[in-house]
Amino acid sequence: MKITVKKTVTAAMLVALTVAMSSFSIPIGASKCYPIQHLVNVICAVFLGPAYGVMAAFCTSLIRNLMGTGSLLAFPGSMVGAFVCGVVYEKTQKLLPTYVGEVVGTGLIGGMLCFPVATLVMGKEAALFTYVMPFFMSTACGTVMAAILVGALSKSHALDYLRGMLEQS
């Protein structure tokens, strides 16, 4: 992975946007669903790649936890989703599989990885699939928002232009 100033600044701005929008959450079941994170995961996957996406998800989760607007469950959900959708986009260069990667990464894998965090770190009683459905609903909402935004950028050819701007040194 080549670290560039443009990509680092873009990731930092997306982290700032995501943290600023942290008040937009939907409580579903035992978790606080946060669709903006999933929107940003897809944007990071398309524009920045999986490594920047995971770093942005980590920074967002850390800042939200320090501010008291997030929970420890944000780490596995957001980071796994960012990784999976980033890798899928990197390998396929197609948007639909990237959206599916975000939903599967956050909803299924991230939701299941919340089990050890909830039981061992947070001391909560939970079953293995306790967080899968709330995470799935949150990521589905955020991924639909991302599909609308990225789809509009793609149809207007702004997606290629913006991606090209980030690739320039």
Image (cartoon, rainbow, N blue to C red):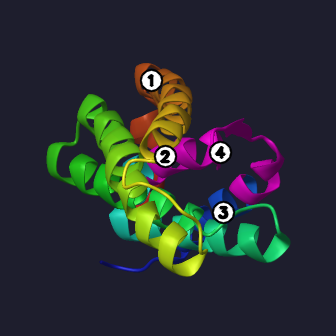
Question: What quarter of the picture does the N terminus occupy?
Answer: bottom left
User: Between tags 4 and 1, which lies in front?
Assistant: 4
Front residue of 167/13: it is 13
Q: Which residue is mark 3?
A: 15
Q: In this rendering, does residue 162 appear at all?
A: no
Tell me, yes or no, whether the two marked residues, 4 and 1, touch with CB atoms within 8 Å.
no
Give the structural element (helix, strand or loop) at label 1: helix
Q: Is residue 136 left or right of residue 105?
A: right
Where residue 34 is drawn, which disc sits there? 4
Q: Which residue is mark 2?
A: 43
Q: Earlier in the sequence, mark 2 or mark 1?
A: 2
The amino acid type of the residue labelled 2 equals Ile
- Residue 6 position within the rendered picture, expressed as x and y whole percent measured from the top left: 54, 68
- Residue positioned 42% across, 71% down in the render: 116
Task: Measure how far apart labels 4 and 1 are at the Cα level.
Answer: 21 Å
Q: Is residue 52 left or right of residue 142?
A: left
Q: Which residue is mark 1?
A: 151
Q: Earlier in the sequence, mark 2 or mark 3?
A: 3
Tell me, yes or no, whether the two marked residues, 2 and 3, touch with CB atoms within 8 Å.
no
Task: Measure how far apart labels 2 and 1 are at the Cα level.
Answer: 11 Å
The amino acid type of the residue labelled 1 equals Gly
The amino acid type of the residue labelled 3 equals Val
Give the structural element (helix, strand or loop) at label 4: loop
- Residue positioned 66% across, 75% down in the render: 62
The amino acid type of the residue labelled 4 equals Tyr
Task: Measure how far apart labels 3 and 4 are at the Cα level.
Answer: 14 Å
- Residue positioned 58% across, 62% down in the render: 74
Mark 2 surroundings: few (<14), some (14-19) or many (≥20) residues within 10 A: many
Where residue 84 is drawn, which disc sits there? none
Give the structural element (helix, strand or loop) at label 2: helix
